[in-house]
Image (tube, rainbow, N blue to C red):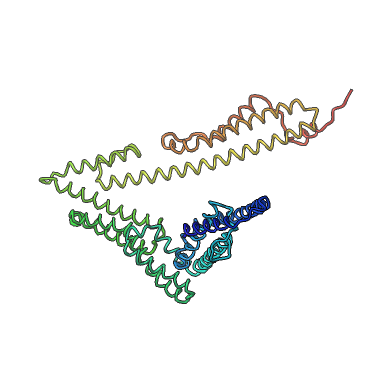
Amino acid sequence: MKHLKTAIAIGLLASMAGCQSTSKPETHETVTNVEQVSAIGSYESIKADQDKWADVMANVADLKLYSSTAYGELVDAWEDTVEVFDEMEADPTITTDSYSIFSSGSYADKHNELLADVVKWHTKLTDLKETADRELKDSREQIDYLATIEADKVFPHDYKSVYSAYKRLFEYIADNELPKAQEAQIKFLAKAKTLEEKVVLKKYISPLKLRLSVQRKSSLHTVAPISYAKAKGELAKSELIVKANTRDLEIITKAVADTEFKLDHVVSVANEVRYLSKVKNGKFESVVLRYEAKILLLSKMLSDADYRDVALMDQIGKIIEDVEQQHVDADGLKSEGSIELAKLMAANEGLKSKLSEAMTKSVSDDADNSALKAQLTREQEHSEQLAQLLKSFQTAQPIAANEAQKEPVKVSVLEEVEAKDKTSVQAEAPVQVEAKSPTKAAKLAKPVTQD
């Protein structure tokens, strides 16, 4: 069609050239220039619209779901629009020329007509999308989750059937049959949920069933029947949990881990049973000594004790008692440490209070100013020492918890501080900051007289 239009245009131009008058060449040239400028201006406006819709059309593939018919019309209209624009892009001066000998409209008019069709079909699809997204919200979420768990790869045939039912929902919306869409959505959700459950069981439970089957083929159900029965029961429980929580990955992971633990336990018990079954002529002493050596290692690590003078089960019982006692001791030490820490903090606050009062009195009592300064210095040193001890205590408390049983605390930190205070008091006669009697208070308050 494009080549035919070009041939017709060439013929018309040749005919016009034969009939053309050359009486006023300058006037004709001026008119031609004006027409070209006008054509180029129209082309620039059209190009802006074309570029805008080119961006829109680059992202319309998802709209096909809402109506394949409307989507097809949209694509056809856009292709025609692009064809007309390409001709104008090749020669912008034809923008205002007649598009066809069968039409009085220009290239610009034809482009605008086709672009209007693009807008119409795009608007129809976006309206359908708005309605469908609102009415089929649950179905959209369901199909998205099936995509997340890769249902199409796990059960491709089942997924194809479910997706076909999903597409029919949008066809009902496109045909404005909302009641049918709602009814079909109920059936779709039930079908999709069944597939979801099937996929999750396949991913998480089927591998566990395979392990249990392999254990049975290996005769573990006869070697360790009790442990095997427990593992089988745990697997059945996990399957029910997964069915009830197909979207809760945390719950699913825990259920799978519990079953894997039971299956591993079957193997470990079976190995021990087979080990014992290989003992010949009733020579079980080596087996007992083997277990006893492992228990001795634990008792030595915990309390440096040797309980081999009692039965194996009693040895284990004593080890448990040691562990419990260590917990009790650690808790007691922690409690004592908290009390000691509280006392240190209270003592420090007391020193700060005395220091504050002494500073107040040093300002008001010039007569004993030098003595008060000495007292202030001592009080400040005591406060700094106590703060340092407090810091050391806080740092050493976790270490003390571990060393509590090896070396009991003989003197508390607070007693050490109090002992230092008493030594300081005996070494030098301190100046009393606070009045101990009315006489002393009066002496301190007495103003200094000048000679």
Whether residue 179 is situated above or below residue 103 in the rendered picture: below
Residue at 44% in and 71% down:
171
Give the camera-side residue of 80 and 301.
80
Give the camera-side residue of 105 and 13.
13
- Give the tally of numbered discs: 0
The quarter of the picture where residue 103 lies is: bottom right
Residue at 49% in and 42% down:
334
Residue that extends furthest to the right in the rendered view of this protein: 451
Residue that extends furthest to the left in the rendered view of this protein: 281
Q: Quadrant of the C terminus?
A: top right
Residue 22, x across and y down, in percent: 64, 53
Residue 177, x across and y down, in percent: 47, 76
Residue that extends furthest to the top in the rendered view of this protein: 451
Left or right for 41, reference 234: right
Whether residue 390 is situated above or below residue 12 in the rendered picture: above
Give the camera-side residue of 434 and 396.
396
Residue 209, x across and y down, in percent: 27, 58
Give the camera-side residue of 163 and 284.
163
Residue 356, x across and y down, in percent: 71, 36
The quarter of the picture where residue 242 lies is: bottom left
Residue at 55% in and 56% down:
13
Left or right for 373, reference 20: right
Residue at 53% in and 37% down:
394
